[in-house]
Image (cartoon, rainbow, N blue to C red):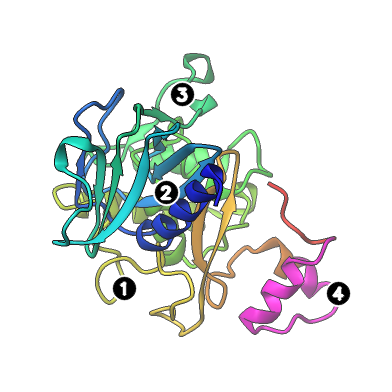
Amino acid sequence: MSEGGATQRSASALRTALAGQRMVRFDAPKLIGPVPQAGRIIEHVECHGRHLEITWDDGLVLDTNLRMSGSWHLYRRGGRWRHPYEQMRAAVEVEDWVAVCFSAPIVETHRLPDRRRHPGMGRLGTDLCQPGADLGAVVNLLLTHPEPETRLAEILLDQRVMRRVGNVFRCEVLWVTELSPYAKVGSLTEHDAIRVVNTVATMLRTNLHQEPSTSTPGSKGGLAVYGRNGQRCQRCGGTVDCRQMGEQNRILYWCAGCQVHLDPKLEKSSDDTPMDPHPAAQRYLADLPWNRDVG
C-alpha cells in the first residue's frame, strides 16, 4: 500500500474510534500551538496526503505531518504500545481507545478560520453564563437580526449575538426547543426567541462547573442528540441524524422526527402536497437535487 494509502487507512480507523467521543486526555511533548482540552468532543478525523488532522468541537485542529517517518496507531486503553514512549509525538485518549502518533516530524495545532473573530465584525455578545446577563437584549438581537434568512443554527454560534455557545450546546438547544436545524432566524416569534435564549442560559449555567455539556434538560441523562447519530431519540423514538452545515461545515445532530418547528421545507410542503411525516421520507425529499441544502 502507498504511503498516502496507509495514512487514509489510519484516518479511517481513528475516525471510527474517536469521532463523536469526549476526549479524556491529551499528550504531545513537542506540540506547537494551543493544547486541546480534556472534555472536548472530537468531531473530525481527516487526512490530506501525509497530513492527518483531528478536529475538536471548539474549532481546534491537530495537524500531524507524518512525512516518511510518522505513523498513527490505535490501541485499547491499557493496551501495550508497539513503539517506545520516547517516539510518541501525540496521544489522544477517549473512553475506550488511545490513538498514538509516533515519530511525526511536525505536530501542531491551529483554529479553524472564523470571520466572526475579526475585530471589524463587531463586539462580542452577552455572556449568558452570568446571572445578571440581559436576556432581553439577546432576544431582541434575534428578533431584529439584519439577515433574517440566516439559519438559527448559525446564529447560535455567532459570538456577536451570544457567547459560549459551541457546537455541542447548539445541537442540544435546538433539540430542547424542538426547532429544525433549517429554521431561519427571521421566522422566530417572540415566544420562540425567549425560549431559545432561556434554554441557552439554563444549559450554560447548569454545565458551568461540570465537564462540557454533561446535562441536557428533558433528556434521560447526558447529551440528547450530539454524537448519537443513528440512535433513537429519547423524546419521540425517531432516529438521530447528522449533517455538515454552515461556513465551517460543523457537524449538526438533530432528530428529524420531532425537531420540525419552523422547518421551511415542511412549511412549503403544506402549501402543496402533504408530506409523509416519517423521518425517512423527510430525509429522502431533503436530498432531492432541487431541495438539497448547499449552505
Q: Alpha carbon of mark 2 to alpha carbon of mark 1: how far?
A: 18 Å
Alpha carbon separation for disc pair 2 and 4: 34 Å
Q: Is residue 58 above or below residue 244?
A: above
Asked if residue 260 shows in the view, the reply is yes
Residue for point 23% across, 40% down = 37
Magenta range? 268-289
The residue that label 1 is drawn on is 219
Q: Is residue 271 magenta?
A: yes
Which residue is identified by label 4? Answer: 272
| Mark closer to the chain start, 4 or 1 | 1
Contact, CB < 8 Å: mark 4 with mark 1?
A: no
Verify whether residue 138 appears in magenta: no
Say what amino acid the circle numbered 3 marks. Arg
Q: Amino acid at mark 1?
A: Ser
The answer to whether mark 1 and mark 3 are in CB contact below 8 A is: no
Mark 2 vs mark 1: give the one in front.
2
Q: Going from the N terminus, do you reach mark 3 or mark 2 first?
A: 3
Q: Is residue 276 left or right of residue 142?
A: right
**In the rendered image, which residue does mark 3 sit on?**
117
- Name the residue at 44% across, 65% down: 175
Position of 71 with respect to 254 (left or right) is left
Label 4: element kind? loop
